Image: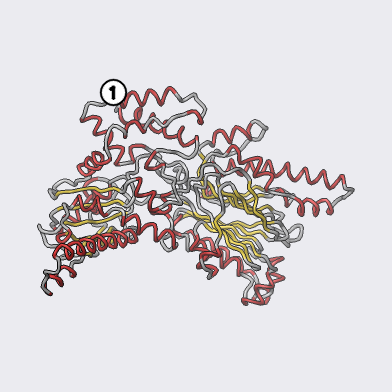
Amino acid sequence: MEQLKHECGVAMVRLMKPLDHYHRKYGIWMYGLNKLYLMMEKQHNRGQEGAGLACLKMNAAPGQEFLYRERAEGNDAIRKVFAAVHEKFRDFDPGELDDADFAGRHIPFAGEVYMGHLRYSTTGKSGLSYVHPFLRRSNWRAKNLCICANFNMTNVDEIFSTIAVKGQHPRMISDTYILLEQLGHRLDRESERRFNEAVARGLADTDITEYIEHHIDVAAPLRESSPVWDGGYVLCGVTGSGESFVMRDPWGIRPAFWYSDDEVWALASERPVLQTTFNVEAPAIHELMPGQAVVISRTGNMRLEQIIEPKRTLPCSFERVYFSRGSDIDIYRERKQLGRNLVNPILEAIDGEIDDTVFSYIPNTAESAFFGMAQGFNEYLNRCKAQEIIEANGNLTPEQLEKILGRRIRTEKVAWKDIKLRTFISEGSSRNDLAAHVYDITYGSLRPGVDNLVVIDDSIVRGTTLCESIIRILDRLSPKRIVVVSSSPQVRYPDYYGIDMARMDEFIAFRAAIQLTRERGLGHVVEKIYQDCLAQRSLPSGEMENHVKRLYALFTDREISEKIAEMVRPEGVDTEIHIVYQSLEGLHDACPRSPGDWYFSGDYPTPGGVRRINEAFINYIEETYRK
């Protein structure tokens, strides 16, 4: 599968006891910092372009730093970040490092609240200034704000306008920075409201500060800011006075799970991360519900707040197919079911020749679906065996019965991920030759010219890896036919909620549909779709329609799959090639709790998604199709 850069990962730890408690019980006050490190490493799959962490020290005296941040870029950013944090501990002698009370007052990154972030760029913007967490500073602790998020907003310009109209002048136009300024502005207003309450009560000086810090409520800024947000998000934050929060989008697009006991509250993007980190079973982990926030006060009181009413709940199905770790009990079962649901279309592709077929998978993320596919075929064979025995009506010899019962599908590890393609060779035949060796094969695993080869992958998005490496290397085994199976449906539409799929021509399914319109003289339909997209540009997002669906309605799924098979055939390969995709019905059957299928169906959960797909089609016509 072509690697997709996708949703970022978030992690958060809020200690519920003084640092001295962890020092006495675990022999180290770094309990929270170490837990955050483990949670970030366990989510390394979610972001390999950058990482950052923030720490709040709640007991710092005036004149001392209380909000710390460290960020780094690169695949090894987690290591860089934590190495930089531990480097700061070298300034203190062993006695000071072993004193939890001293650490809580004086040592950097010895605090009660930790936030971590793993970044994949989905906007093309890179550099340390785009790595979370983001900080907004003030001399008033309660007005300091630090956020990190797993999200993409589809309407950054609209959010920008809501703060610019109030006279603010943001220095950057990025969704994270704009949200920081928007929330920061509302936090300022909330702080000022509490200030006025304190004055009305006759308080003065530091008593006012104490009143603000113990009464400020971040739920108010969230309620005032979030109605304009269009996108998928899990937003984490902490104020300088110690109020922590995490909020999930009202459609439930992005995932968030939390755990709490009397020592700690923790959040992660994936459930198994919390299970492993805190050694607890799945029922102890809670899913944050759509539109909901967890708010933890300065004193450690936790409460759930419904910040915005849930919309139509559409958790991302690609999380289940590919992005999330397969160690989650539900995701593992769902991926196996995705493979099981493909038995019938695979049978059709191999003309029922089970005994002359080798089944395998593309490493490594398709392994769970492969187990399900194999299980499904064994169940099918069992039904065939039972029927054959029944029809024999007791007239089988022991040898015949043994032969029937001995039928098994043949599974092999045919493909091996051998090397990572380096980017120093970027063009031409040299690059293609190198790409052809990204995978290696198990020689002798097939009978040349006799056996079919079925290989399952988690998705087929762009088709480049199929053409440049997978099919070419599999063809060296001389199979009778190659059947490449995708455990997910045809990816037809861009994503605007956290995955780097934004251009129409990135998708092999879209290119196949366009090619079919050319071959069948349907260019006028493409032009009409373009004109209809242009005509609704001035409409509010909520009134727009996804006209691109009409392109795919011209053809059956099979016609598009057959065209894809033609397009991914490498030059010089004559073997019969079939491409089999999961159906939408099969996806929903396997992943009933994650119905968000806009990549496949075009049914975007938010109005901003519909606007963006129309813009993407307009851009394709003007920049590519007509040239």
Q: Is residue 315 above or below residue 278?
A: above
Q: Nearer the viewer, residue 137 or 21?
A: 21
- Point out residue 106 in the picture as x, y percentages from the top left corner: 70, 66
Q: Residue furthest front?
A: 393
- Residue positioned 35% across, 46% down in the render: 585
- What residue lies at 56% left-to-right and 65% top-to-bottom? 284
Residue 384 coordinates in the image, percent (x, y)? 20, 61
| x, y percent for residue 248 | 56, 49
**37 relative to 495 in the view: left or right:** right
Q: Residues within 10 Å of mark 1 (few under 14, many from 20)?
A: few
The quarter of the image holding the C terminus is top left
Horizontal relation, residue 291 to residue 517: left or right: right
Q: Amino acid at mark 1?
A: His
How are the residues colored?
secondary structure
Nearest the viewer among 449 and 160 is: 449
- Is residue 423 in view from this perspective? no
Viewer-proximal residue among 460 and 102: 460
> In the drawing, does residue 441 fall left or right of residue 420?
left
SS type, badge 1 = helix
**Residue under numbered circle 1:** 524
> What is the count of numbered marks?
1
Q: Give coordinates of residue 557: x percent, y percent.
A: 28, 40
User: Can residue 437 be seen in this snapshot?
Assistant: yes
